[in-house]
Image: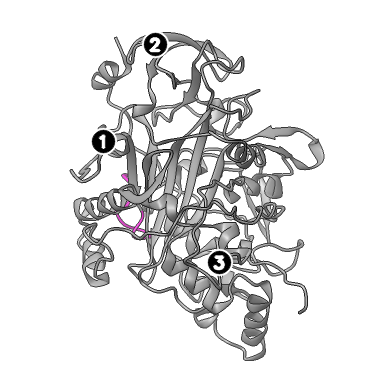
Amino acid sequence: MNLQTIAKTVALAGFALIAGFVACQRPMAPAPAAPKSNASLAVEDIPTDSDYPADSNVLIGMIDQGDRRAMREHAWHLWAGLTAPSREVVDGQPIPVFETWYSIPEVFDDFYRNNPDARRRISHPTELPRQSFHIRNLTGENRISPVMSFVKFNRSAAQFIWDKKYYERKTLDDLNKSFDGGDTPNERREISPFPKESVALKVVFWLIKNGSSPQSQSGLTALPYWDPAYSPPLNNDLPTHDSWSKCVAVDPEQRYASGSIATINCNGNSIQAEVMHLDRFYSYKLASAEDVDDASRFLKMVSGASGKEERMVSNDGQTPELGDHIVLTAMHVTTKEMDNWTFQTFWWTPFPDLPPGGDFRTDNVRGQFRNYQMCTAYDMVTPRAADGSPAICFNPYLETDLGPTKSYVLGDQTFPPDPMAGTRSNCMTCHARAGYPAFGEPGSRSANFGRVFNEGYIRPDDHIFDGLTKTDFLWSIALQAQPRPPK
């Protein structure tokens, strides 16, 4: 009996609820090499037939009416547009629209500010997701979730950052000082709003070994997947993907029949796993030394005082080699179609059609991109969870490590450990707290409040913004603005 058959006999539990995000200091990603002379990539935007950009009043009406179907259908239309084939061809195949967009280094290291239409080569300048850094800050632990991700901006968002010079830390410093000097109320301590056509993405990939590599398992790679019915891990551990007990066996070279069962090591346990080919994923082949270098640069990190080497995006002991693939496992998508942006997040699963994550998928989502589930966070409060708590929307490949495993103190309040907090989090509630400075020394004013509970609606004049500049719901502005040498 394969996984799809088993899935039809099991009623999987719905999602539980959402906790906040914390932005902690981390080393900046290494600057990328200058674009190669054989660059061949041009930016494309979401196709006009993807219900984008939607009228903000229509979206607000969906929220006011609690129209879950309408919100989800809009999110699926966005997904269809982002993943539609672009006019750009790499290795003989059209790449999705989102792959043509600007990366964090291209925007914040200022490569294309004066020549935004310059053609570029496809690359994945990957980094450790910011979500993973709050654990060490709050609890003194050094655990970092081994997931590889990167941020991308469409043309509108990138151009706005360049025009406003929000890629420079000095711009934000000067703005914050002007707010302090003018005794500006918190609701007005903010950068200029992004244009309504702006889109920002956080994309997550997983390393799949080539069949000839001794790092593979007889040509297979284990890929853990989220099951909402997972029990909380023992010993107050976090429910990150390296603790998940269920995996599929990815066979990139079709050595095994799709749907057959193979014995594979899944996070230290020998299990019977369903074999899946790459047609179940969006994938990208590491076909050149540059591709391998892009992946390898971010696959190893020394995690603070422990000196432990953490491997990101791969199973233990696996590193990038020529012929490997990286497969898309998750994507956060946020659009400025409303003042508070829309938030939707997508993740890969072997059971894409199961509710609630598979509900109302539209027909324009094509091919391998139909193997992803989704949730929306168009509001911080509604639709409420079954227990009446604020709305829940989290990505299992990004948020399950948000919960602290030790108690911690903020101000005069002590918070208990809550390792499952990430499974009760909300995208909009997290991004509403985005502000500059994003981090600072203990006792200094920063957006690093360490709140890991889902408090629902956050007022624009909330005291958490005292002394800060809100960055229009985007942590990337607060975290990635660069110091610049005097000219």
Q: Earlier in the sequence, mark 3 or mark 1?
A: 3
Mark 2–mark 3 CB contact (< 8 Å): no
Whole-angstrom CA distance, mark 2 to mark 3, is 45 Å
The magenta stretch spans residue 52: no
Write down the residue under mark 1.
355
Q: Secondary structure at mark 3?
A: loop
**Quarter of the rendering occupied by the N terminus:** top left
Callout 3 amino acid = Tyr
Q: Is residue 158 left or right of residue 445?
A: left
Callout 2 amino acid = Tyr
| Res. 236 in view | yes
Q: Position of residue 388 (x, y in %)?
A: 34, 50
Write down the residue under mark 2.
256
Quadrant housing residue 276: top left
Q: Nearer the viewer, mark 2 or mark 3?
A: 3
Q: Position of residue 210 (x, y in %)?
A: 52, 22
Q: Secondary structure at mark 1?
A: loop
Q: Is residue 418 above or below residue 264?
A: below
Write down the residue under mark 3.
112
Q: Earlier in the sequence, mark 2 or mark 1?
A: 2
Magenta residues (range): 377-388
Q: Earlier in the sequence, mark 2 or mark 3?
A: 3
**Quarter of the rendering occupied by the C terminus:** bottom right
Whole-angstrom CA distance, mark 3 to mark 1, is 42 Å
The residue sitting at the bottom extreme is 182
